[in-house]
Amino acid sequence: MSDTRPSETGTDPLRARLDAARAIAEEVGRYLLARHGRRVEAAEKPGAGISIPIDAEGERIARDRLSQLFPDDAVHGEEFPPTAGTSGYAWIIDPLDGTTNYSLGLPIFATAIACLFESEVVIAVVHAPALGYQYSACRGEGAYQNGQSIQVGRVQELRHAVFMINKAYHPTDRLLAVAGPLIDRLRTFRIYGCVSLDLCFAAEGHVDGVLLLPTNGWDFAAGLLVLLEAGATVYSNVGLIEQPALDVSTRLGILAANPPLSAAAAALVDWEKIDRSPVS
């Protein structure tokens, strides 16, 4: 493994990867958007969720570009086995987050790309082509939407708060067991069915917070960095998250908002009631 760390070489290695992630997400987005707008037949995945051929082709596009630009980087994705690397960098790709929405012709879907350096997320891009939104973050440099700095919202009382909720294919009764007291205290909530955008909408203050039941790393890795860089306090089923460090096989639940709102919400969530059996 290379011993060259981002902090030793300035931001050049990160900037190159951020620029690449943006360009690749946009290319995948163009591919998705050109085929979007009508209902698509989908196949069920084992356990939960659905898959459509466009998922695999979108990831193939991203993998091809990354292998050309950064051949020594590892690559992990939802559709294909991982590719090993030697550089210390590892990419996590979700070519089509919100597959159900996409298959129904709905516009709430995104391509999510994260880059880790030695297990810490350092680059994130979430590109929503049908909405015209691109969220991005580079570790320590803030979070952005279409080039404009974003911050989490300022609402500090649960009774005034609107949260995004994503149960990530867990049964509804499990969601209520984990977070029923929180849901009852909120002004209201929204379920959009796209993890990366749920996290980014909270990061931008479109909504006041977000609750995500445990899901796979490719779903949340990019959005997690955007949240942290936007000033969110992030709790999870394994504790407070202060650094965006993760193993690529990690499954996390996420609860995030501005610091006082997040603390109030966390007091009403019982992660011990989640069933930790795998959910695909």
Image (spheres, rainbow, N blue to C red):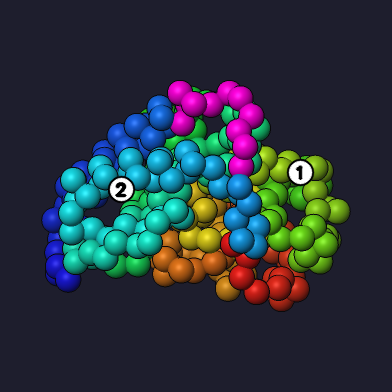
Image side of residue 73 versus residue 159, left or right: left
Nearer the observer: mark 2 or 1; the answer is 2
The residue at 56%/47% (across/down) is 51
Which of marks 1 and 2 precedes in the sequence? 2
Bin the neighbour count of mark 2 within 10 Å (Cα to Cα): few under 14, some 14-19, many 20 and up: many
| Residue 97 picture location, percent across and down | 53, 44
Say left or right for 256 vs 267. left
Asked whether, in this view, residue 150 is left or right of residue 105, the answer is left
Q: Quadrant of the C terminus?
A: bottom right
Task: Indicate the amino acid at tag 2.
Answer: Arg
Between residues 48 and 1, which one lies in front from this camera angle? 48
Q: Is residue 178 left or right of residue 253?
A: right
- Residue at position x 49%, y 41% in the image: 53
Above or below, 45 against 202 in this view is: below
| x, y percent for residue 260 | 65, 56
Of the pair 185 and 108, the residue shown nearer to us: 108
Q: Which residues are magenta?
A: 32-42
Q: Which quadrant: the N terminus?
A: bottom left
Look at mark 2 in the image and give the residue it sits on.
Answer: 63
Q: Amino acid at mark 1?
A: Phe
Q: Kindly identify which numbered label has been placed on residue 189.
A: 1
Q: Secondary structure at mark 2?
A: helix
Q: Residue sitting at 61 percent across and 25 percent down?
A: 38
Give the alpha-carbon distance from disc 2 to disc 1, as whole Å: 36 Å
From this viewpoint, is residue 155 visible? no
Q: Is residue 270 above or below residue 193?
A: below
- In the image, residue 182 lies at what x, y percent? 79, 58
Q: Main secondary structure of the magenta part?
A: loop
The reply to whether callout 2 and callout 1 are in contact (CB within 8 Å) is no
SS at circle 1: strand
Q: Position of residue 229 (x, y in %)?
A: 44, 49
In the depicted view, which residue is nearer to us: 206 or 71? 71
